[in-house]
Amino acid sequence: MTVEHFDRALFRRIPEAHLKTMYENPHIRLPFDAKDLAVYLHETGEMPMRALDYHHRSADLGLTGPIEDTDNGHVYFQVDVKGVGFLFPESYESVKHHIPKGEWRGAKGPQLLIDSKETPWEYDVYGLMDKRMAKDAIDRSEALTKIGVRTEAVAAVYETDAIYVESETVTIKEIKDRMEKQWQEKIAGARTPEEKARYQKMRRNFREQFTPVILTRLVRSVFRLRDIVDEPARREAMLDEACDVLNREMTLLGQPASFETRTPQGREQWMEHTAGLQGKNLGLMHANNFVHGYLHMGNLTLAGEIVDLDSVTPLIREKKTVADEDRDLPFFHETEKGCAFLDPKTLGYQRPDPAFGLPMLLIKDMRDLCFSIRQSIRNLTTLKPADRARVAARMADAYEQALQGREPYAAIGIANSALVNAFRSMADTIVTRDKHVGPIPQDRSE
């Protein structure tokens, strides 16, 4: 498998004078200088990289040799770089932001989106990655890789004060100045004083705090379950590459394997194996008080990884002292050490599930993962009910085994048996019986 099976874009390295090191992973020894991948989209760039539809600001090198994190027991086979330009603006669309496909056709350089639902500061710049998002990616990646979750590893992050626009070097200050008109129009169009003040605050945040970075990360596979649905013409190539990765990984671990997806039996074996890996991933996250919140097909790779960790957060918070206002918090419990309750970052999915009594964000994780596996089965296999039951059991067993030895939510009165029963029920309903369970709605505001 080579990059020639896919579209390529050209990139040029950003001169070192424009770069500032933010982070270099101490657990990983790269076979190249990470700064060589501090690149940006350039019409006549000397570095071709693979560019995938729906991956709008990242590109990758295709398959590489194994890169090991021996401290945490992980091995990676693909390198991608994020924040390297707005790729495929002509095909970009977003239902949640009311952007139809083609609206940004012909866009040159980064594009500002005000009122973004993707960032805490309520704006985003397509084609660039913010330093604050990179900091979160580093912290969450380190936390999850340490506990054994198959996920991305951040290899290096470099701040940059310049990029390329139409092959010309443009400073970030100039980029911000070019976007000033858009901010002023938004402020002038505000309907209330409160809305005007909000946009003025967002603009100040953008001018003062937005700092672009180039982030290099490692994964086993860059391909997501969504990719094989959205790009059926490249489906076989993606699956072949993912199986190649899994076979190499298993061999390195002393467990020779021969995954392939060219036959129905091979595809079913791959499906069962990766579903089990994802069940374990979720079990490890929940066992260590982490929830993801968005385990849709776009955040699950063909090699059994969970990626894009922006939403990862602890489920419960514990305190040594108890204040009167704490008692009104969702799932509040007094403990020998003080008290515990749902972390405020879980806002929106804090109500208890009526069937199992679990916080709804746990149920959302379970539902979303099972739904993603169900959709993959539908798109890629002809599994019969008995075979789907085997996949569901593999997922649920792996989830339960990952919880062993931990009681992550005992402080709020939740036993592991409730977690396991809920996941098995969800897997049986969605995966085995192929029943539709709709998206988990957010809590209703009082």
Image (cartoon, helix red, strand yellow):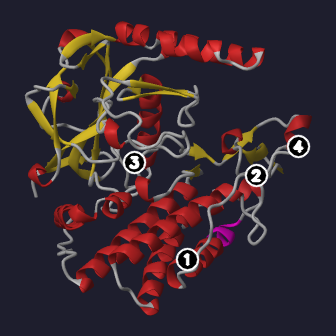
Which residue is pictured at 59% across the width and 18% down the height? Answer: 186
| Residue closest to the eye, 247 or 438 | 438
| Residue closest to the eye, 152 or 378 | 378
Disc 4 vs disc 2: Cβ atoms closer than 8 Å? no
Locate residue 416, reporting x and y percent.
Answer: 65, 67
Amino acid at the residue labelled 1: Ile
Task: Give the residue at mark 3.
Answer: 145
Q: Earlier in the sequence, mark 3 or mark 2?
A: 3
Q: Which mark is residue 327?
A: 4
Q: Secondary structure at mark 4?
A: helix
Q: Earlier in the sequence, mark 1 or mark 4?
A: 4
- Residue 202 makes an appearance in the image: no
Instruction: From the image, state whether disc 1 or disc 4 is nearer to you.
Output: 1
Residue located farthest toward the right when viewing the structure as drawn: 324
Which residue is pictured at 62% across the width and 60% down the height? Answer: 364
Label 4 to label 2: alpha-carbon separation: 19 Å
| Residue closest to the eye, 135 or 310 | 310
Label 3 to label 2: alpha-carbon separation: 31 Å
Q: Earlier in the sequence, mark 4 or mark 3?
A: 3
Indicate the quadrant where residue 97 lies: top right
Disc 3 vs disc 1: Cβ atoms closer than 8 Å? no
Locate residue 19, reporting x and y percent.
Answer: 26, 15
Which residue is pictured at 34% across the width and 56% down the height? Answer: 224
Magenta-colored span: 415-419
Q: Identify whether 339 is placed above or below 270.
A: above
Label 1 to label 2: alpha-carbon separation: 22 Å
Q: Earlier in the sequence, mark 4 or mark 2?
A: 4
Amino acid at the residue labelled 2: Asp
Q: Is residue 177 left or right of residue 323?
A: left
Amino acid at the residue labelled 3: Thr
Instruction: From the image, state whether disc 3 or disc 1 is nearer to you.
Output: 1
Task: Give the residue at mark 1.
Answer: 430
